[in-house]
């Protein structure tokens, strides 16, 4: 769950935020304005300042709010002058919008308010639907309302071109003042503001509803507020239920439900608040809960309304639904509260009356919206390093209790005239980050400067009549703004750790709490309630003391007993269970499964086996040595828990089908424990590890350093033996790691008496390319060495004595070193053979001629994936993609696009592992079901369709029957987050009930029921959430669609990400110490990017349009580069994935065909052309420097052999690791 | 603390070097048998670790006594089988003397001083009753009674076979804090010399909501004795008074 924030105002008017993954309140930078009221939705905070003006604060965005303004320039041809800007009287404007209906000259397009700035100047669009245009960007057509083509023909009568320019909301992370109603801001100040409606059904543009109440009791609606225009356009007065009514308070729920409280205590509900009529239409009176005490405060979530009265009684309104906003009855709640704030998911917070603490209502669930009890939030305040007033905060701690309590009206009037500057941007750019002690001083100065600027600018900029939005006193640069409200909470956590010594203030008195932006799930409550008064230091000392003493105890006891036998011998342990098992892809049968392991001490096992026995244990059907296990993964289907056990050399896994999820977790956990103990894995994977994910989101990692100790080895090399006894000659064996320097091959065999000659060939791809030909010729008494390429043999090397004879055994050793092949026969050096072909392209060895070969021994520096000893362990987590770099920083992306950073732990959920570095990990999955109906003349639309129709409940294509009941959760780690609800945000739009209409079923659906429509459908959605423990910590709240990690030559970690909207982000300052980095930098680009990959200052991306983009100008000092350069895709192909290595670029198109880029060099990073890699389709590509890995369409892992700088396409795919792999990341 | 694997592992790994000697009056053979030396887990119980000892000594004992119940004695004190071994050592051995010299007897069972131990099952049922008692204090017995038989079994086998992971896989459930983030009460026993152990209901947090320290606990158990006058051993070590009971 992404971290969200609860806001509060203390009794001094300071704003604080509390992160759901944090433990301390953090103060917003104080800039001279106190606040009285807050209202929030995620990322947007509206507030009433102490000057009783309205401020808006936009935060938590990693990418700026950017709007593309477009203008079309139109021209018409005439025979004399050619194309000119003079148009016919009936024509459109010379400068217009796309369909020509509006006059839009470049000059007339202004910034909507001073919170915006232009990011670029007007530019011509030089592409049309992805095709490049000439440098003027004109497109031609016969006449205006027509299709435009890039080329001019004889019939082209008109032409147009598109100009575009970006504007950016520049007041990000700053308080931005909204212009007052009158020029004199004290004339009609505001007393309340609320924001809501960010989850209105049917809203596709991200609109929000902002309402405000003036001191005269008038109600104002802010028009045009949305995610792309945070400050809105203007205030519109809203008529009140009765002419003399005066509003005191207003609250607006996430779905647009709006209640007002009058000074008389009357409650009214606004009706018909929809996306079409955001201001609503009418008022409905709701009788107040009691006659004794007037209602003074109201707050609402999606399904609940809570009010407090002047005597601080809390009431819950029962029966509030999305259809009926008024509810049915009042329920009195226990406890006295000053005010209540309800979160969008109906969780409730409140401020107590006497103690002024913030309370959380525990036990609020969808079925029990009233909850159980009030629980105080015990989070201390962390004094922000931005805080300008830390001293006064402490000293003033007791000063002003009561001024804000309940009867605000009196206290407000006193200060009314004190602040007169109507328009101001309050920003808090810390001038020098490093110098904390000066921070307060300088930031105070900067706020003073900003106020000064206002006075200068005010008269010139102010526009009282239209009130067109916020006016800013000074320009800001959000890129460098570092407010207390950080975008990334990891950094907060990091800083929190660092600043542990900072003073913490307990027992703050709160005047207001605002929960509109907080998302807390009742079964996963944040750590706000534990007593945080125990500082870690204190705990550390006694813990350390205990540990030291325990160690001393052990030393003392061991010193004496070093040679003693242990009283309890470690015996073998057998775990037995009943399960269904499928052997070798066969049928499921009931068996008894026994896992037995033996060891001499705990956690160090000598051997372990899995035995499959018949149910009566009489017959042993199968036995697996766990040393042969490659990996275990869950292969469950919903409701059917399964575990697949993959062993070396077998294409089919051993599949266990368990009866319960608990048994499934138990088996996986046991397997992982046994295998880890077998391989002595007791730590996190090394930086050289391979990371992969599977279909079900399990994370697997393979550590070559672990394998090194266990694969049969000589001189620390990985070894593979081929037994060639009784093989037919010629015989060929693949060399899975090629033959780079360091590799060695020994061939033994017997030479028959009749032999004349035989040969050992190291071949590249096929026998048409032989890098080394070793050819003992007994008839000529010499050993010939040569190479074969382009159909010709090279120059023979025959130097050296024969050294072997017919009728004897022989051993020939070929070793590749920096100079070439060193060849030995029968233990004596024969000579060196210079490499004439790149030894890294060698793929296989072939032995032919008169010889009886016995064995081939192949020694390689890299793990040999065909041999046993290659164990992929589960690391815990639920991720779609994991990316790593070669120095030990690893990131992942969940199925819901949340980015995660690896913490260095292992295990989690059901897996055994480290206890440290574990965090709660979550993921979400949305289930969708389509409800289809056909119209008939009698009953109208009904579920009765034609026999040929799709089922009433189906998937999107209508081919698969799918009902609400058939959507079941995968396992017990999942739970339903929501109930089934209708989706209104579907392409084509919907009507009020979510229906979409069409002529017939396989047609395009639209929102309105036309005369000709005969079918309709609507989409139901239900969200499931996965919760488990894992070694991952969540990163920020920006969702990522793709990710790339790599290191440059300087050892700096470069992290690039892509967000859902297609923008690229670069992560600043990622290092081993701060693996989560510091902040995202936005790298703007006009195309939507879908995939990204990088290697050592080379970054490539793929756009949604299928083009590749190469980032130009990346250097060690400018890691973000200069600009994207479009690289046209291969002909008729639309690229979807790119993988970058050391002067190596591979790409994959939408058909899963593969391409490699030719002509790459250090000076020409973008290469020259694409070359098809024909053999096999892959659904995923991964490059580690010069190694290319792929995942086949079936989900098997495979490697490309023979890839070098000069032969980027390689020769063949070697070995497969079967499994349900979906993603791999290797960086070495 | 229940999630602090490092400490748990150290506590679990505590093993005492013990020198077992056959009581001189039991030797029926000509030569005296050599003593036998063993490392015994502190957390285990004596009947679980004596198999090797019995095997070693039984051939030196008069056939008449060979099938008798074996019992142990240190410095003249018979050792109670139902106390964990580490506790027996901490109670009886004053000066941290190692190895721990234990005398083995096959005769004259001091039935008025110690209990008979008929079988391993007796140890198991004693151990499980201790676990249940602690769970009553921690969670009002909700966890242990919801466990399956095989989980109970795994817990016991984990202890019997000295398997840390096997034991803690189950025991971690028992050590999970309750709804309030705390146990209901702290499960503890204070042993003092030969006296029966002291025990009372102690909540893990003070009335002010702060976690209780060892000092708080001792003050509640022994209100009359100044804390500074006590010497407290937990698992054979002294721990700081400000250690949190619920840490």
Image (cartoon, rainbow, N blue to C red):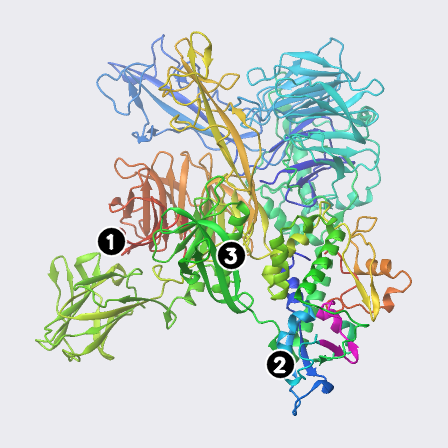
Give yes or no for residue B27 being in the magenta stretch.
Answer: no
Q: Quadrant of residue A1153?
A: top left
Give the residue drawn at x 84%, y 40%.
Answer: A398
Closer to us: mark 1 or mark 3?
A: 3
Give the residue drawn at x 58%, y 27%.
Answer: A230
Q: Which of the chains bears the disc numbered 3?
A: A
Q: Quadrant of residue A324?
A: top right
Is residue A1091 placed above or below B79 in the rendered structure?
A: above
- The residue pinned by badge 3 equals A576
Give A1195 or B158, whichever is nearer the viewer.
Answer: B158
Give A238 or B206, whichever is nearer the viewer.
Answer: B206
Q: Which residues are magenta?
A: B71-89
- The residue pinned by badge 1 equals A1211
Residue A1047 location in percent, x, y?
Answer: 44, 54
Residue A875 location in percent, x, y?
Answer: 50, 53
Near mark 1 (Cα within 10 A), the count class, few <14, some 14-19 or many ≥20, is some
- The residue pinned by badge 2 equals B56
Residue B10 location in percent, x, y?
Answer: 65, 66
Is residue A55 placed above or below B15 in the rendered structure?
A: above
Q: Which of the chains bears the disc numbered 2?
A: B
View extreme (right): residue:
B224
Is residue A494 placed above or below A215 in the rendered structure?
A: below
Which part of the image, by quadrant, shows the N terminus of chain A?
top right
């Amino acid at each position: 769950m992404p971290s969200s924030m609860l806001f509060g105002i203390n009794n001094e008017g300071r704003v604080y935020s509390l992160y759901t993954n944090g433990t301390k309140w953090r103060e917003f930078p104080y800039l001279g304005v106190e606040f009285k009221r807050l209202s929030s939705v995620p990322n947007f905070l509206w507030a009433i300042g102490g000057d009783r003006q309205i401020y808006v604060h936009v935060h938590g965005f990693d990418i700026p709010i950017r709007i593309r303004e477009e203008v079309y320039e139109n021209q018409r041809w005439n025979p004399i002058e050619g194309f000119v800007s003079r148009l016919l009287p009936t024509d459109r404007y010379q400068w217009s919008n796309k369909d020509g209906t509006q006059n839009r000259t470049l000059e007339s397009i202004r910034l909507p308010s001073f919170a915006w700035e232009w990011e670029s100047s007007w530019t011509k669009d030089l592409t049309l639907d992805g095709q490049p245009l000439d440098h003027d960007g004109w497109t031609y057509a016969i006449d205006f309302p027509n299709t435009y083509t890039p080329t001019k023909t004889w019939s082209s009568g008109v032409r147009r071109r598109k100009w575009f320019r970006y504007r950016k909301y520049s007041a990000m992370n700053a308080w931005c003042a909204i212009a007052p109603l009158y020029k004199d801001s004290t004339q009609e100040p505001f007393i309340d503001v609320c924001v809501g409606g960010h989850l209105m059904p049917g809203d596709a543009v991200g609109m929000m509803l902002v309402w405000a109440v003036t001191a005269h009791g008038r109600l104002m609606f802010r028009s045009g507020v949305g995610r792309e225009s945070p400050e809105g356009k203007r205030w519109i007065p809203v008529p009140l239920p009765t002419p003399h009514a005066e509003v005191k308070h207003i609250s607006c729920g996430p779905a647009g439900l709006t209640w007002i409280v009058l000074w008389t205590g009357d409650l009214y509900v606004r009706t018909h608040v929809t996306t079409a009529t955001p201001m609503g239409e009418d008022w409905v009176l709701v009788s107040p809960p009691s006659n004794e005490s007037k209602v003074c405060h109201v707050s609402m979530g999606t399904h609940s309304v809570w009010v407090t009265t002047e005597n601080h009684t809390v009431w819950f309104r029962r029966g509030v639904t999305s259809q009926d906003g008024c509810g049915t009855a009042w329920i009195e709640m226990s406890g006295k509260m000053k005010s209540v704030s309800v979160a969008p998911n109906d969780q409730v917070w409140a401020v107590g009356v006497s103690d002024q603490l913030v309370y959380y209502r525990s036990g609020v669930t969808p079925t029990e919206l009233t909850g159980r009890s009030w629980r105080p939030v015990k989070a201390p305040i962390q004094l922000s390093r931005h805080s300008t007033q830390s001293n006064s905060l402490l000293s003033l701690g007791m000063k002003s209790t009561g001024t804000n309590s309940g009867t605000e009206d009196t206290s407000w009037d006193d200060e009314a005239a004190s602040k007169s500057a109507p328009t101001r941007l309050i920003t808090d750019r810390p001038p020098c980050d490093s110098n904390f002690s000066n921070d307060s001083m300088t930031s105070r100065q900067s706020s003073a400067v900003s106020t000064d600027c206002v006075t200068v600018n005010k008269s010139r900029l102010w526009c009282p009549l239209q009130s067109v939005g916020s006016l800013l006193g000074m320009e800001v640069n959000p890129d460098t703004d570092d407010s207390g409200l950080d975008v990334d909470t990891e950094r907060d956590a990091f800083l929190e750790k660092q600043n542990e010594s900072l003073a913490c203030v307990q027992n703050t008195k709160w005047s207001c709490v605002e929960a509109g932006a907080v998302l807390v799930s009742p079964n996963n409550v944040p750590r706000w309630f534990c007593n945080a008064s125990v500082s870690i230091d204190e705990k550390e000392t006694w813990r350390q003391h205990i540990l030291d003493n325990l160690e001393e105890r052990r030393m003392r006891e061991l010193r004496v007993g070093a040679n003693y036998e242990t009283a309890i011998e470690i015996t073998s342990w057998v775990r037995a269970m009943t399960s269904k098992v499928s052997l070798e892809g066969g049928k499921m049968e009931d068996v008894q499964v026994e896992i037995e392991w033996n060891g001499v001490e705990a956690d160090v096992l000598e051997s372990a086996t899995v035995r499959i026995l018949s149910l009566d244990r009489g017959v042993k059907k199968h036995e697996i040595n766990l040393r042969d296990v490659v990996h275990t993964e869950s292969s469950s289907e919903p409701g059917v828990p399964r575990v697949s056990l993959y062993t070396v050399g077998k294409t089919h896994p051993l599949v266990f089908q368990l009866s319960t999820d608990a048994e499934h977790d138990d088996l996986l956990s046991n397997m992982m424990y046994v295998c880890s103990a077998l391989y002595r894995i007791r730590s996190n994977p090394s930086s050289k590890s391979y990371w992969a994910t599977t279909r079900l989101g399990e994370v697997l990692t393979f550590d070559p350093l672990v394998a090194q100790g266990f694969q049969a080895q000589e001189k620390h090399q990985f070894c593979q033996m081929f037994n060639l006894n009784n093989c037919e000659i010629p015989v060929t064996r693949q060399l899975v790691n090629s033959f780079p320097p360091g590799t060695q091959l020994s061939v033994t065999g017997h030479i028959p008496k009749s032999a004349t000659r035989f040969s050992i060939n190291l071949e590249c791809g096929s026998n048409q390319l032989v890098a080394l030909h070793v050819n003992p010729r007994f008839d000529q008494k010499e050993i010939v060495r040569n190479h074969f390429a382009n159909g010709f043999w090279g120059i023979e090397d025959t130097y050296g004595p024969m050294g072997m004879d017919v009728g004897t055994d022989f051993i020939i050793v070929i070793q590749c070193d920096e100079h070439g092949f060193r060849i030995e026969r029968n233990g004596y050096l024969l000579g060196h053979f210079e490499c004439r072909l790149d030894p890294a392209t060698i793929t296989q060895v072939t032995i032919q001629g008169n010889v009886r070969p016995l064995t081939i021994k192949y020694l390689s520096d890299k793990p040999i994936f065909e041999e046993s000893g290659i164990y992929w362990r589960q690391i815990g987590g639920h991720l779609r993609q994991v990316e790593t770099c070669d120095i030990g920083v690893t990131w992942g992306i969940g199925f819901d696009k949340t980015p995660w950073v690896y913490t260095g732990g292992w295990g989690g959920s059901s897996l055994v592992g480290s206890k440290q570095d574990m965090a709660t990990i979550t993921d979400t999955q949305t289930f969708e079901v389509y409800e289809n109906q056909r119209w008939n003349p009698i009953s109208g639309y009904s579920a009765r369709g034609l026999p040929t129709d799709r089922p009433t409940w189906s998937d999107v294509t209508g081919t698969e029957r799918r009902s609400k009941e058939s959507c079941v959760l995968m396992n017990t780690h999942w739970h339903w987050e929501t109930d089934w609800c209708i989706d209104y945000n579907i392409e084509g739009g919907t009507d009020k009930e979510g229906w979409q209409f069409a002529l017939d079923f396989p047609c395009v659906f639209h929102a309105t029921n036309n005369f000709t429509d005969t079918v309709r459908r609507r989409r139901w959605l239900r969200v499931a959430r996965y919760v488990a423990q894992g070694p991952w910590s969540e990163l920020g709240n920006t969702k990522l669609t793709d990710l790339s990690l790599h290191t440059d030559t300087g050892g700096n970690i470069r992290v690039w990400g892509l967000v859902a909207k297609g923008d690229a982000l670069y992560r600043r300052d990622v290092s081993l110490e701060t693996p989560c980095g510091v902040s995202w930098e936005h790298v703007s680009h006009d195309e939507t990017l879908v995939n990204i990959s990088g290697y050592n200052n080379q970054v490539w991306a793929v756009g949604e349009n299928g083009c590749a983009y190469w980032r130009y100008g990346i250097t060690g000092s400018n890691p973000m580069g200069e600009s994207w350069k479009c690289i046209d895709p291969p002909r008729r192909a639309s690229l979807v994935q790119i993988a970058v290595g050391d002067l190596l670029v591979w790409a994959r198109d939408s058909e899963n065909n593969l391409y490699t880029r030719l002509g790459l060099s250090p000076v020409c990073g973008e290469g020259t052309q694409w070359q098809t890699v024909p053999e096999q389709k892959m659904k995923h590509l991964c490059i580690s420097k010069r190694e290319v890995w792929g995942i086949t369409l079936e989900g098997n892992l495979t490697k490309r052999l023979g890839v070098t700088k000069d032969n980027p396409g390689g020769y063949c795919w070697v070995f497969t690791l079967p499994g349900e792999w979906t993603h791999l990341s290797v960086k070495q | 603390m229940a999630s602090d694997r490092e400490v748990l592992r150290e506590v679990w790994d505590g093993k005492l070097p013990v020198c077992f000697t056959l009581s001189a009056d039991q030797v029926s053979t000509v030569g005296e048998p050599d003593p036998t030396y063993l490392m015994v887990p502190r957390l285990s119980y004596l009947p679980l670790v004596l198999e090797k000892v019995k095997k070693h000594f039984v051939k030196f004992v008069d056939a008449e006594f060979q099938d008798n119940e074996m019992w142990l004695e240190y410095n003249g004190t018979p050792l109670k089988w139902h106390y964990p071994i580490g506790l027996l050592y901490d109670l009886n051995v004053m000066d941290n003397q190692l190895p721990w010299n234990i005398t083995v007897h096959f005769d004259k069972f001091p039935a008025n001083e110690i209990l008979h131990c008929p079988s391993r099952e007796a140890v198991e049922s004693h151990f499980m009753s201790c676990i249940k008692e602690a769970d009553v204090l921690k969670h009002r017995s909700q966890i242990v009674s919801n466990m399956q038989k095989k989980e109970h079994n795994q817990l016991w086998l984990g202890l019997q076979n000295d398997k840390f992971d096997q034991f803690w896989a189950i025991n971690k459930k028992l050590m999970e804090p309750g709804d309030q983030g705390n146990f209901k009460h702290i499960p503890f026993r204070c042993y003092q010399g030969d006296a029966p152990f002291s025990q009372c209901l102690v909540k893990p947090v003070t009335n002010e909501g702060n976690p209780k320290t060892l000092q708080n606990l001792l003050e509640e158990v022994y209100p009359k004795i100044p804390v500074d006058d006590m010497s407290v051993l937990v698992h054979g070590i002294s721990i700081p008074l400000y250690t949190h009971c619920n840490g």
